[in-house]
Amino acid sequence: MADNQSFSIQGFNLVTLLKRLEAATSRLEDVTVFQESHVLANKDNAPAAVDAPAPAPVAAPAPVAAPAPADIPKSIKEFDLFIKENVIPYVELSKQIEPILGEQAEIFLKAIEKEREVLLIANKSKKINIEDLKFEKLIIKPINELIMKVIKIKDDNRSNKNFNYLNAVSEGVAVLGWIVVSTPISYIPDFKDSAQFWTNRILKDIKGKENEEISIEWVKKFLNIFDELKNYVKEFQTTGISWNGSEDFEECITKLEAGGASGGAPAPPPPPPPPPPANLFEDIKESKNDNKNKTGNNGGSMSAVFAELSKGESITSGLKKVDKSEMTHKNPELRKKPVPLPPKKPKSLSTKEEEIKAVAKVKKAPQHELVDNKWMITNVSKEDIENGMISIDGSMNESVYIGHCEGVVVEIKGKVNAISVNMCERLAVAQASKPQQPIAAIRHFPR
């Protein structure tokens, strides 16, 4: 009797809890319905709200005045004047002569502007030792990349009719390395001499031709850059970069590249978030239903797996029965039969390595000529020449480059400045100290 009474009390408490839960659910549904009706009413009354007086706009805060720029030091002003009066005219003339020459001049200008940036920041920064990795990363590397671009334009346009112009700039652009030298005044003239070798060729080849005047003017403007740069360095940067501050160089250059802090008005605050959707509870219900469906699907698949496992011995009923004549353990003769070969790979499918080899085997036109002061022997094979031998008469002011050759003997008569070999197979280089003397040395390059 006591047990029945206890059970009824527990049942009564459970029913009460269920009723309370239903009441709370109905209240939440009423709140949702009320919210939806309120949103619809606001939409219907929207035109009337337009006639209502708008609230007074909140005054925006006054913009913060931009900080006044620091005074530019005299050394930088003079460097700007050097760029304006000497480098810019050279760039403009280069564009008039040849677009490629103009492109090379633009990169030359960018390298000088990069040096201007370094000088400006160094004026207010602590000194960085040249052995420091920061010096290479922040100063040498950016300028050197631009110098290499200038040289690359020359290398990519060897057949250009204005190659002497490109070569002059390529030989002279290394003068920008003065910025890392402790004695830049004696450093600059060496590169002027290198560039002047090619400008003299320009003046020699241009005599009596249509564009003689503009070429002469271009040579004057280009060589004048070296003279004016030397004068500037002599006055302001006698021992290299002038470090005149206490700030960190890396931090300053990072701020400069990032554009610095803007001095305008602060940005307006972000707009308020959108109102929550009226069917918030419906979304929650849908997400729960989706989760139930997913769980149900997974449960169904798992139940199918367990059903298969519970079959026991009957699980093998669907397997095909093997005849005794086909069993290798009962018929040893079957083991002696050859195993069938795997299917061949279709020829149409090729790996990336095969494609790369096919591209690499495309033969370029052979070259065997003297370009300026360098013998260029490239893409030559045994079939391209008679007896498989190339003979050249060299001199001390010439060098030899041999590249991508196969099965060739190169005979060099006379002493040369240098011999370079690259990507050759079965190559032999024979050299005699003088043209009339017999071969003194033979070097073999199997690969």
Image (tube, rainbow, N blue to C red):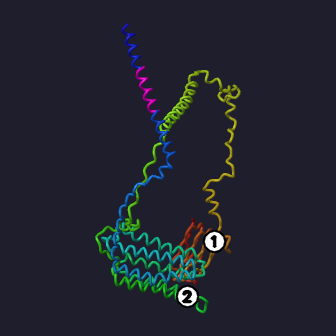
**x and y, in percent, of residue 317 in the image:** 64, 23
Image height check: is 14 above or below 358?
above
Quadrant assignment for the C terminus: bottom right
CA–CA distance in space, label 1 to label 2: 40 Å
Q: Which mark is residue 380?
A: 1
Q: Which residue is located at x 59 percent, y 66 percent?
A: 425
Mark sitting earlier along the chain (1/2): 2
Quadrant assignment for the N terminus: top left
Looking at the image, residue 421 sits to the left or right of residue 347; the answer is left
Q: Which element is circle 1 on?
A: loop
Q: Which residue is located at x 45 percent, y 75 percent?
A: 111
Q: Quadrant of residue 70?
A: bottom left
Q: Is residue 367 visible?
A: yes
Q: Which residue is located at x 61 percent, y 69 percent?
A: 405
Looking at the image, residue 364 sits to the left or right of residue 258; the answer is right
* Total number of numbered discs in the rendering: 2
Residue highlighted by disc 2: 214
Image height check: is 312 above or below 99?
above
Comparing 207 with 427, the one in front is: 207
Q: Quadrant of residue 383?
A: bottom right
**x and y, in percent, of residue 24 in the image:** 42, 29
Looking at the image, residue 163 sits to the left or right of residue 20; the answer is right
Q: Which residues are magenta?
A: 15-29
Classified by dominant secondary structure, the portion drawn in magenta counts as helix
**x and y, in percent, of residue 127 in the image:** 31, 71
Q: Which mark is residue 48?
A: none
Mark 1 in CB contact with mark 2 (< 8 angstroms): no
Q: Is residue 254 visible?
A: no
Q: Which residue is located at x 38 percent, y 10 percent?
A: 3
